[in-house]
Amino acid sequence: MCRYAFHVYRDHHVCFDCRKMFRPHKLEDYRSPMQCPECRNPLHDMGRDFRPPKQANKKQWEKAKLLYSNGLTFHGCGCGSGPRVATLRDARELVESRFWAMYATKAHMRRKKR
């Protein structure tokens, strides 16, 4: 059963510069672009299933930033968090394989049309 179907959970927004996670309290916070209360940089919506690393763990935050910048976030229905990668190297491999698969699919479709 989907955990998010019966209760309203707040999304997890992160600041990669401060290495902190925030959850908006009011609906108005969602309407405007959210800013970090400390550095005023924009917050990034990582989804409800995102578990932030400890603030001192810079490599894990770099991994989260890499995943976010490549469109991999943790939005879901609560049934599962999707693939989790343990290291920055694993994240790079996931990103590279994902783009390679996308490129290979497009190239295959172009060949089919000829």
Image (tube, grey):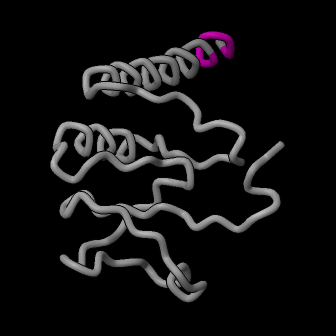
- What secondary structure is the stretch in magenta mostly built from? helix
Q: Is residue 88 above or below residue 13?
A: above
Is 103 situated left or right of 110 in this image? left
Say which quarter of the image contains residue 21: bottom left
- Residue shown at the point (34%, 19%) measured from the top left: 93
Whole-percent x and y of residue 35? 33, 78
Look at the image and give the residue range highlighted in magenta.
Answer: 109-113
Q: Is residue 76 above or below residue 93?
A: below
- In the rendered image, the quadrant that contains the C terminus is top right
Residue 111 sits inside the magenta stretch: yes
Say which quarter of the image contains residue 34: bottom left
Whole-percent x and y of residue 59? 19, 37
Whole-percent x and y of residue 13? 42, 64
Which residue of the protein is positioned furthest toward the bottom in this rendering?
Answer: 28
- Residue shown at the point (48%, 61%) measured from the top left: 12
- Residue shown at the point (19%, 43%) measured from the top left: 57
Q: Is residue 24 above or below residue 70?
A: below
- Residue shown at the point (69%, 46%) measured from the top left: 78
Instruction: Tally the numbered discs.
Output: 0
Say which quarter of the image contains residue 113: top right
Whole-percent x and y of residue 79? 72, 39
- In the rendered image, the quadrant that contains the N terminus is top right
Residue 81 sits inside the magenta stretch: no
